[in-house]
Image (cartoon, grey):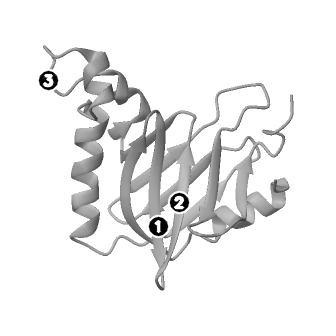
């Protein structure tokens, strides 16, 4: 696991990367970044949202609501047909059509992360658990080095 200053440096190193995708695996939000052919992944198991100015474009709680309001919520979740999935797909298509480079990436002392890209778009990750439960991890795809918050996530 990684110490707090190293975690902050790992997050800061996202500056200059290109946002490539947004999605989920079960209830874990995944954000993809790319620089020079290297792929980086941010996995958030805590509250997460993408905002543009004052508008929330997508949030992790959107996984609780089906795209079709008359559909079964559990089935929508299991088949990736939630509001989150729809909005994340739209954002991923938008990222693919442009060059959205990270202009700022900051981790605060409470473990929250704010990643900013052009057009006043911010990715916000905010741990909301007081225990030693993993909130998020950042890693280069294919690497065994994972930056995990909190660094005590592997202990009881």
Instruction: Tell me if mark 3 has few (under 14), some (14-19) or many (20+) residues whose alpha carbon lies within 10 angstroms of its own.
Output: few
Q: Work out whether 75 lies above or below 34.
A: above
List x then y, in percent, for residue 133.
73, 32
Local secondary structure at mark 2: strand
List x then y, in percent, for residue 57.
31, 42
| Residue on which disc 1 sits | 33
User: Residue farthest to the bottom?
Assistant: 36
Q: Nearer the viewer, residue 80 or 151?
A: 80
- Label 2 to label 1: alpha-carbon separation: 6 Å
| Residue on which disc 2 sits | 41
Local secondary structure at mark 3: loop
Quadrant of the image containing the C terminus: top right
Q: Nearer the viewer, residue 53 or 149?
A: 149
Task: Look at the numbered discs 3 and 2 and tell me whether their residues touch, using CB distance below 8 Å.
Answer: no
List x then y, in percent, for residue 35.
49, 79
Instruction: Tell me if mark 2 has few (under 14), some (14-19) or many (20+) residues whose alpha carbon lies within 10 angstroms of its own.
Output: some
Q: Work out whether 146 lies above or below 30.
A: below
Identified at 70% across, 38% down, the residue is 134
Task: Look at the numbered discs 1 and 3 and tell me whether their residues touch, using CB distance below 8 Å.
Answer: no
Local secondary structure at mark 1: strand
Describe residue 33's horizontal placement relative to residue 99 as left or right: right
Q: Nearer the viewer, residue 123 or 133?
A: 133
Which tag, 2 or 1, sits closer to the chain's start? Answer: 1
* Total tally of numbered discs in the picture: 3
Identified at 26% across, 30% down, the residue is 82
Instruction: Tell me if mark 1 has few (under 14), some (14-19) or many (20+) residues whose alpha carbon lies within 10 angstroms of its own.
Output: many
| Residue on which disc 3 sits | 68
């Amino acid at each position: 696991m990684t110490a707090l200053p190293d975690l902050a440096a790992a997050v800061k190193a996202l500056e200059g990367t290109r946002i490539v995708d947004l999605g989920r695996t079960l209830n874990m939000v995944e954000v993809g970044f790319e620089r020079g052919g290297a792929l980086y992944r941010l996995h958030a198991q805590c509250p997460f949202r993408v905002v543009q100015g004052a508008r929330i474009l997508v949030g992790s709680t959107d996984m609780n609501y089906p795209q079709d309001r008359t559909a079964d919520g559990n089935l929508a979740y299991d088949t990736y047909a939630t509001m989150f999935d729809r909005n994340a797909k739209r954002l991923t298509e938008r990222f693919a059509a442009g060059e959205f480079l990270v202009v700022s990436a900051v981790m605060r002392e409470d473990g929250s992360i704010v990643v900013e890209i052009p057009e006043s778009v911010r990715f916000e990750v905010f741990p909301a658990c007081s225990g030693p439960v993993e909130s998020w991890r950042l890693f280069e795809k294919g690497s065994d080095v994972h930056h995990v918050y909190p660094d005590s996530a592997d202990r009881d």
